[in-house]
Structure formats: structure tokens, C-alpha cells
Image (spheres, grey):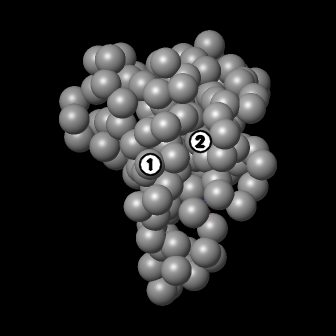
Amino acid sequence: MSQQLFEAARAAMAKCHAPYSKFPVGAAILADDGNIYAGANIEVLSFPEGWCAETTAIGHMVMAGAKRIREVAVIAEKLELCPPCGGCRQRLAEFADAGALVHLCDANGVRKTLRMDELLPHGFKTEAIG
Ligand code: THU
């Protein structure tokens, strides 16, 4: 399954819209419904308004009606391993259990696998909100 996720992330990366950073990123989520939802980074001329590959993939998952992330793969063309940025860690953690697997990939496949709680220890949580 991680090979399939890697391939989906790599295919998604090819669809990135990253004319400013020229830093293509792809992500693919295996969701609780058994389907794979992928995404690429999408940039806009007003730089802070762009968003990450993981965020696109989460949007696809949520809009398809899936609820939870079982596994996720991330790949960046120009980086050997692309650990998700801080904001994406929080977004992934919103939908992933502590033991969900995060696969960091290079051009050839999965190179490192972490648990969600290794990727984001001490993440923001509070019962004061929900
Ligand atoms: N990027 C991602 O898509 N995911 C990450 O986890 C790190 C950064 C994107 C955002 C931007 O389009 C480009 O990589 C350079 O920061």
C-alpha cells in the first residue's frame, strides 16, 4: 500500500502549480474509506496565499466524505525527504490518529516512515474548544 501511496503522491506532484518557488510537492492520503486522495502545492502571485500539497490532499479527502487519515505519503522533487511543514503537521493531526503512518519519499519510493505523533509531538490540543 505504501508503494501505491508513493506513486499517487508522485503523480500528484506533477500537477503542482509552483511557478514562484519552482519547488514541486505531492501528497497522497489513504483514508478510512479505503480510497487515496492526492494533492499538489498550489501557489499564487501573492505568495502567502498559496498552500501546500498536504492541504490540497486533505481538501480532496474531506470533500469526498472520508473522515480519517490512515496513512499519508509526501514527496518533493528537490528534497531527499520532505517533512511536512508545521502548519501541515497540525492539519494532518486533525484527521489522523497518533499511530497513523507518514511516509517520506524520494524519487524512488518511501525512504522513511514516521508515526503521526513522532512527526508532531506536543501538538496543539484543547478540550476548551472541542
Ligand atoms: N510545501 C508543501 O507543499 N508542503 C510542505 O510540507 C512544505 C512546503 C510547498 C509550499 C510551497 O509551494 C513550496 O513547497 C515551497 O515552500
SS class of the residue under badge 2?
strand
- 91 horizontally vs 110: left or right: left
Mark 2 vs mark 1, foreground winner is 1
Residue that protrudes farthest toward the bottom in the picture:
45
SS class of the residue under badge 1?
helix
Residue located 31% across and 25% down the image: 35
* Of 103 and 1, the residue lying toward us: 1
State the residue position of label 2: 74
- 63 horizontally vs 61: left or right: left
Q: State whether residue 123 appears in this view.
A: no
The image's mark for residue 11 is 1
- 100 horizontally vs 45: left or right: right
Residue located 57% across and 63% down the image: 24
- Asked whether the beta carbons under mark 2 and mark 1 sit within 8 Å of each other, the answer is no
Q: Is the C-beta of the residue carrying label 2 under 8 Å from the nearest atom of ligand 1?
A: yes
Q: State whether residue 112 appears in this view.
A: yes
Residue that protrudes farthest toward the front in the picture:
108
Q: Callout 2, which amino acid?
A: Val
* Of 62 and 8, the residue lying toward us: 8
Position of residue 33 relative to residue 88, above or below, is above
Sooner in the amino-acid sequence: mark 2 or mark 1 = 1
Position of residue 99 relative to residue 114, above or below, is above
Position of residue 43 relative to residue 36, above or below, is below
Question: What is the x, y in percent for residue 45?
Answer: 48, 86
Question: What is the x, y in percent for residue 93?
Answer: 56, 30
Question: What is the x, y in percent for residue 99?
Answer: 62, 13
